[in-house]
Amino acid sequence: MNVCLYNVTTTTQYGGVESFVWEVARGLAQRGVRTTIVGGDGNIRRAHDHVRVVTFPFTSRETLRKLPGFAKQYTLTKLLERLHFAQHARAFMQREQFDIIHIQKPYDLPAAAWFKRSSKSKIVFGCHGTDFFSFDTRFVHTSDIAVSCSAFNANQVREHYGIIPRVVYNGIDPAQFFPQTPNAELRKQLAGDAQTILYAGRLVRWKGVQYLIDATALLAKTRDVKLLIAGEGEYRATLEQRARDLGISERVNYLGYISSAALAPYYALADVVALASYANETFSIMSAEAMACARPVVGSRFGGIPEVIADGETGFLAEPENANDFAEKIARLLDDEKLRERFGSCGRERVLRLFTWDAVTERVLEAYREIL
């Protein structure tokens, strides 16, 4: 089997989709599959044995948005970026005659149609969100099979395109995220003697960190508690002001950006991990990472989060944008150490069963074999 994982940003930026491509490529190569990553000209590489990386030039969306009239054309500039990339990659893709071309975004459906006209390649349409554009339905039947990162996302894709994707969850590395003894000195430095709640992710409005701050204010009325926020983003100043307005600035500790490779010891510090997203959350890598570290998780009953967190088994689900519900669910865990331990143990087991990169690769291979 000769497979191409095609995605312009794999070699130009960091993110969930990019990690998916790199890790699946490694898993395929380890199983003896000829594997090529085709990405844009960039410096990002991972040292994976037997994975070929080929790059091509492209005009980035950021450059396009500097042109008159394009500053706020977010969807159009992403599409044009991908079309320009495909123009440079087209001859190579057709010459290689891959058995499988696995794309990761709807923006690459037109390119896949080009590639397929002069090759026998089968097209796998990977879906990680809702990056739809106005005439994309014209190209969707170029794909031979679609795979989605959650059942929630598969339903979004079905409603838009009328196709039913196979669910292939995202994954994490359980050798990187694993249970460990908390660093007592670091915990003392960051939280003192307080019980700790941890959020790790971008600081943007729809991630709902404001509701975790509100919940912390409610919890602080009856206990010594601290909210640790690992991440950066445009919404940080607003969050800091919200904590000041509630009079709990001293109970919120902003840790700044922490790389994925360095994050596991911070999960170990947490009594509870919490996320309150209320939009754009088709999966929850943060929940899977925390569960792999045997931490109980309280998350929104929204999007793909309920597919990661087993409510009442590995954590609790709370109503989105409801600080009172978050506070009540977090309090139940803070008050019961044995429950936290049980949820943590069950969470680790669930991750090892469903959300490892080995499991992801096997599901991807099943999709490949079906269409071949």
Image (tube, rainbow, N blue to C red):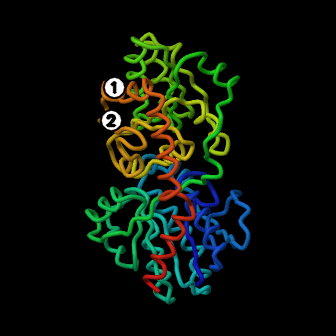
Report whether 185 appears left or right of 247.
Answer: right
Estimate the x, y position of residue 51 in percent, counting from the top left. Answer: 69, 72
- Give the vertical position of 20 relative to 315 (above or below): below
Q: Can see residue 206?
A: no
Q: Nearer the viewer, mark 1 or mark 2?
A: 1
Residue that mark 2 sits on: 318
Estimate the x, y position of residue 333 in percent, counting from the top left. Answer: 42, 29
- How far apart are labels 1 and 2 at the CA level? 9 Å
Which quarter of the picture shows residue 204?
Answer: top left
Report whether 101 appears left or right of 165.
Answer: right
- Give the vertical position of 313 relative to 356 (above or below): above
Estimate the x, y position of residue 93 in percent, counting from the top left. Answer: 58, 80
Q: Secondary structure at mark 1?
A: helix
Q: Secondary structure at mark 2?
A: strand
Q: For the point 39% across and 11% down, which residue is it?
A: 221
Q: Are marks 1 and 2 in contact (CB under 8 Å)?
A: yes
- Give the vertical position of 214 relative to 278 (above or below): above
Report whether 93 appears left or right of 322.
Answer: right
For label 1, count other residues whose C-alpha is less than 10 Å away and answer few (under 14), some (14-19) or many (20+).
some
Q: Which disc number belongs to residue 183?
A: none
Q: Amino acid at mark 1?
A: Glu
Q: Nearer the viewer, residue 362 or 336?
A: 336
Q: Can see residue 368?
A: yes
Q: Nearer the viewer, residue 186 or 24?
A: 186
Q: Nearer the viewer, residue 309 or 160?
A: 309
Q: For the point 61% across and 85% down, which residue is it?
A: 96
Residue that mark 1 sits on: 328
Which quarter of the picture shows residue 184?
Answer: top right
For label 2, count other residues whose C-alpha is less than 10 Å away and answer few (under 14), some (14-19) or many (20+).
many
Q: Earlier in the sequence, mark 1 or mark 2?
A: 2
